[in-house]
């Protein structure tokens, strides 16, 4: 969250409409959390084996003990039905091996309304 | 029944065993390793040092992987020599072994620092789990240490020792960290992080002597005559291919063991040995694109070469195709991807460098990145005449996958070249837009009926 705070400060300094932008910046703080939650809820973890050096941090940090490292070695997505998609492995991997991919079960954008709102807010910021 | 002997138990050796087993369920695979601890993740040693990982997690395979899945027989022994003519491997203190196919995957080891006192107790390196254990054991009663070297391993040592509350003096030969890969800003980001953790960086400092007292390290004397007292000296000044065995066996060796496109070793510059292969850090593989033989000291080429060698050992002829250099590492807590050429511009094709440290690519609508809590996000792209030559992505990795493909597939970027190099260009948007178009076209080309999502 430090990031967003920095961004806020930066915007406040550099532009005349500082207060407006500050408010938007504050919104973006929540937006980030929302996108993150959304990614977690609608995605599953996919490895990029070319990046993996089998250090085991992912497996070690999985709260339910899935051997994620093995999935990365074998280039298999973590579609284990027990996966909580909590994102611990993705966040902790020191080499960015793991990422969330949308399951896209319904072949559609699940949160189109949220998305369009988010994008307008963002364009006001940059 | 064929007997395959694999010398070395690193990434290349294991990948070879898997490839062999995938094609030959009945053959005998014998893995001869000097490391008593077998196959573990060497890159993971850095996280063992920082305490992020317990030792038992360093072992990616379980017992049954070796016994049942791969059916490998282990032998802890040192190979003295290979006799290519008689298909024999001569071992230290053991009877010779006969092989049908042999793989040399002895890897690389840390370069020894050649100064007086460098063999004192307390001078350490980070090569193996044994080294890491020794460092951890010493760290608890070490107040200060000197770390020497300018690359990734040196930084890992700095981080590992700092995590154990050891006061670290970090010696750099030049003006900044890793100056042949990182640009000034990138280097300063890493250095700043070290300084915040209490590391004292000594720029333009070279070690001329390790000072000892009663056989143990007591300090370091620099070229300028300064003496830095310490109880440990950790050295990471590069690695060298372990070619001693190949040399002793009469194989052709330059910086590494010379191999052809199929990873066969040579007994004379124009004579390959059909049954003996080399792969991984020890192998100097031929790159048909440049016509040169090159050494790689990275995990991915080691695994790729191991697999290719394994296939060739079984008899499935497969050439090794080198891919552009690609490495991911964590520098000062930032995931950093280094793709292709990024060093100090030796390439004549380089048109310009596009840099970005903006927030923009984090806001891309489809970026499902959960790894986003970095304080710094930086991007540097080396733009060539028609293609991207290299890139460094620090922090958020959303763009690194697309950049990797654009670079390794030598995608024509002339339509976006100008906009990339324009001052203040929104690099993230440009790359993602172009990448999306390209990948959709690529999908249409390969699978015309597939639905593009």
Image (cartoon, rainbow, N blue to C red):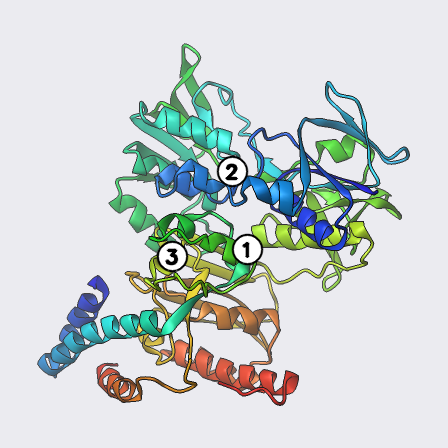
CA distance for labels 1 and 2: 30 Å
Residue at left offset 66%, top offset 37%: B8
Element class at badge 2: loop
Labels 1, 2: one chain? no
Q: Is residue B203 above or below residue B135?
A: below
Q: Which residue position is annotated with label 3?
A: A89
CA distance for labels 3 and 2: 32 Å
* Residue B18, percent from left and from top: 67, 50
Element class at badge 1: helix
Question: Which is more toward the observer, B417 or B107?
Answer: B107
Residue at left offset 50%, top offset 29%: B130
Q: Earlier in the sequence, mark 1 or mark 3?
A: 1
What is the chain letter for disc 2?
Answer: B
Q: Which residue position is annotated with label 1?
A: A73
Element class at badge 3: helix
* Residue B437, percent from left and from top: 51, 86
Residue at left offset 48%, top offset 85%: B453
| Crowd class of label 2 (few under 14; some 14 to 19; many from 20; radius 10 Å) | some
Count of numbered tags:
3
Residue B8 placement, left or right of A21: right
Q: Is residue A65 above or below residue B73?
A: below
| Callout in the foreground (1, 2) | 1
| Crowd class of label 3 (few under 14; some 14 to 19; many from 20; radius 10 Å) | many
Residue B17 placement, left or right of B336: right
What is the chain letter for disc 1?
Answer: A
* Residue B322, percent from left and from top: 68, 60
CA distance for labels 1 and 3: 15 Å
Mark identifier at residue B237: 2
- Residue sitting at the far top: B214
What is the chain letter for disc 3?
Answer: A
Residue B135 placement, left or right of B257: left
């Amino acid at each position: 969250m430090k990031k967003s705070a920095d961004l806020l400060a930066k915007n406040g300094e550099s532009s005349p409409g500082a207060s407006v932008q500050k408010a938007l910046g504050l919104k973006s703080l929540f937006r980030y959390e929302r996108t993150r939650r959304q990614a977690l809820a609608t995605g599953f973890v996919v490895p990029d084996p070319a990046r993996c050096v089998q250090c085991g941090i992912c497996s070690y940090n999985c709260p339910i003990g899935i051997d994620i490292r093995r999935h990365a070695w074998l280039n298999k997505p973590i579609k284990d039905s027990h996966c909580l998609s909590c994102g611990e492995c993705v966040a902790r991997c020191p080499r960015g091996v793991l990422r969330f991919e949308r399951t896209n079960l319904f072949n559609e954008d699940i949160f189109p309304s949220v998305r369009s709102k988010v994008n307008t807010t963002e364009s006001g910021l940059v | 029944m064929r007997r395959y002997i694999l010398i070395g138990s690193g990434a290349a050796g294991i990948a070879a065993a898997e490839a062999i087993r995938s094609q030959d369920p009945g053959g005998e695979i014998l893995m001869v390793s000097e490391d008593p601890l077998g196959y573990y993740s060497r890159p993971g040693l850095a996280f063992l040092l920082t305490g992020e990982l317990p030792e038992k997690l360093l072992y990616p395979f379980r017992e049954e992987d070796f016994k049942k899945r791969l059916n490998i027989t282990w032998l802890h022994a040192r190979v003295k020599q290979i006799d290519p003519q008689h298909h024999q491997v001569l071992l230290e203190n053991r009877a010779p072994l006969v092989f049908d196919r042999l793989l040399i995957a002895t890897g690389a080891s840390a370069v020894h620092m050649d100064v007086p006192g460098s063999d004192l107790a307390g001078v350490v390196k980070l090569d193996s789990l044994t080294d890491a254990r020794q460092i951890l054991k010493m760290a608890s009663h070490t107040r200060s240490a000197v770390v020497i070297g300018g690359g990734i391993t040196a930084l890992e040592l700095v981080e590992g020792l700092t995590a154990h509350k050891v006061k670290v003096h970090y010696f750099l030969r030049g003006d900044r960290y890793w100056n042949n890969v990182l640009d000034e800003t990138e280097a300063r980001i890493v250095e700043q992080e070290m300084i915040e953790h209490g590391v004292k960086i000594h720029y333009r400092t070279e070690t001329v002597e390790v000072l000892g007292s009663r056989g143990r390290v007591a300090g370091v004397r620099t070229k300028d005559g300064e003496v830095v007292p310490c109880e440990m000296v950790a050295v990471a000044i590069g690695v060298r291919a372990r070619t001693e065995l190949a040399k002793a066996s009469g194989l052709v060796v330059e910086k590494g063991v010379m191999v052809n496109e199929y990873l066969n070793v040579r007994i004379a510059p124009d004579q390959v040995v059909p049954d003996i292969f080399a792969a991984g850090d020890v192998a100097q593989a031929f790159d048909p694109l440049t016509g040169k033989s090159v050494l790689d000291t990275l995990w991915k080429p080691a695994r790729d070469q191991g697999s290719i060698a394994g296939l060739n050992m079984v008899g499935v002829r497969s050439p090794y195709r080198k891919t552009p250099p690609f490495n991911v590492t964590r520098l000062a807590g930032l995931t950093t991807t280094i793709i292709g050429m990024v060093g100090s511009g030796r390439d004549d094709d380089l048109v310009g460098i596009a840099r970005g440290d903006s927030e923009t690519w984090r806001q891309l609508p489809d970026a499902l990145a959960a790894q986003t809590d970095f304080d710094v996000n930086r991007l540097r792209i080396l733009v060539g005449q028609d293609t991207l030559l290299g890139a460094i992505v620090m922090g958020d990795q959303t763009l690194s996958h697309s950049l990797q493909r654009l670079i390794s597939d030598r995608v024509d970027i002339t339509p976006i070249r100008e906009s990339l190099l324009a001052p203040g260009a929104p690099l993230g948007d440009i790359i993602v837009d172009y990448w999306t178009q390209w990948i959709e076209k690529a999908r249409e080309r390969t699978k015309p009926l597939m639905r593009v999502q």
